[in-house]
Amino acid sequence: MAQEGKISNGVDRFEQQRHQKLSRIKELGIDPYGGRYEGAEPAEDIKCKFKQGDETQQAKCAGRIVLLRDIGKLIFLTLRDRSGTIQVGLSKKRLTAEGAETAETKKNKKKSSSASSADSAVKETDVQWQLAKLLELGDVIGASGQLGKTKTGEITIWADNLSLLSKCLRQPPEKFHGLADIDLRYRYRFVDLWANPEVMERFKKRSAIIATIRKFLQDRGFLEVETPMMQQRAGGAAAKPFVTHHNSLDMDLFLRIAPELFLKRLLVGGMEKVFEINRNFRNEGLSRQHNPEFTMLELYQAYGDYNVMMDLTEELISLLVEEYCRGSQVQFGDMKVDFSRPWPRVQYAELLKTHSGCDIDDIKAVRKKAAELELDEAQMDDVVVIDELFGATVEDKLVSPTFVIDYPAALCPLTRRKKEDPKYAERFELYIAQMELANAYTELNDPAEQYENFLIQLRGQEESMAKMDDDFITALKYGMPPAGGLGIGIDRLVMVLTGALNIRDVILFPLLKPVRD
């Protein structure tokens, strides 16, 4: 970082100073980018094994220097590794030549064989001490030695062996108080992760959450599968796709917007419980809740319906809250989200009536209300106006987990309609903290009805995308069992479970605008 705490693309004076130290390290015959370093223990394990009064304990650790205090004859370093931090104490008395002795120093030793062994030891020990004096914040080192405590009670490795494993040539954040600039944190996540420990913890928790989801589903007989990322037709959801081109076949392909239609083919094939955790791509805008590349859990269960999916969703997320949050009430920004069960299941039309004052069947009233809210209702179909009004008046009222059920059928071309009232589809969306986190259906498995729904859906699409998925219709003709299907946005779920208010805080490398010169 530059003095102002920013990372510059050019070589600033701080980097020049670090290059000078790099040259001096090389002059000592030390490889500044080390090599294999075996036997290092996690910092937290070392601290846990410490026994007061045992002067025989040895420890070996490797990590990045995040704090450095040079007080002349003593140097105290704080190393950070994947588990946490530990202090390393360096003194000229304790350091030996082993860690710094390289092929070059051995070569020099042979040349000066006439010198006494005592003089040679002094010189070699001095190499290690000179290396210690050249260390800087951000360097990656290994250290081993006796484990003890300082007068202030800090567990410390009193190193008798020091190895430089990688020289840091860029200035870390000033005083190592963390990388604060939000845009730089996303662009330089490789710095953010070790400069801000809470960021590392969030991504470790994300990984653990996904592992728990996998185990939950596998324990219930679900089979994890992988389906194509590049598809000949953009299907499974209503969204704008990314288009690419396969040169050898001379054909356009779409990065998938959803894996739905391929997962349903597997139901036809006899895989009765399947799931996939993978990327979807939608060529749409960026926001605190949207990234064009995002992670979804999508699953299907033969012989189930959307009620089965609600039960499974509530059980899964409640388990995650229990395991990764403290208590059933979770703070998310200025909202308190209460995960106490059972979660309410409320009809779409009922919520619309409650919060907008409009009956879903009174389209004149719906359009009037939409116009009052400055929605461009004149350019929309009736059902789209209804859904836009729902978004404008209802979604921000849904803080604690709420299943919104029975959507207008016209919004759901892949969903079975309710027998008692075909105007509505057996679909739910789960809202938590004013965000849609899950979407689920009782799946439509009638090939004739699906074909007609596809025709209606294709009318509103661009000509280049308006292609019937004949292969999927053919699959349905072979007979797809009745099924429930569910999609959960992993990124948004992790946001809620970790308290991150921006989706970019839970994606390691979010899409960003390019830096302009």
Image: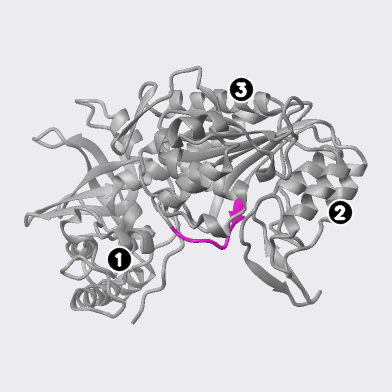
Identified by mark 3, the residue type is Asp
114, 425: nearer the viewer: 425
Of pointers 1 and 2, the one earlier in the residue sequence: 1
Tag of residue 311: 3
Residue at mark 1 to residue at mark 3: CA–CA distance: 51 Å
Residue at image point 33% right, 56% down: 192
Tag of residue 290: none
- In the image, which is nearer the foreground, mark 1 or mark 3? 3
Mark 3 secondary-structure assignment: helix
Residue bearing the label numbered 1? 168
Tag of residue 471: 2
**Disc 1 residue crowd, few under 14, some 14–19, many 20+, Cα 10 Å:** many
Task: Please give the range of residues in magenta.
Answer: 278-286
436, 112: nearer the viewer: 436
Residue at mark 3 to residue at mark 2: CA–CA distance: 32 Å
Residue at image point 67% right, 71% down: 244
Residue 280 magenta-highlighted: yes
**Disc 2 residue crowd, few under 14, some 14–19, many 20+, Cα 10 Å:** few
**Compared to 289, does 486 lie above or below?**
above
Of pointers 3 and 2, the one earlier in the residue sequence: 3
Residue at mark 1 to residue at mark 2: CA–CA distance: 55 Å
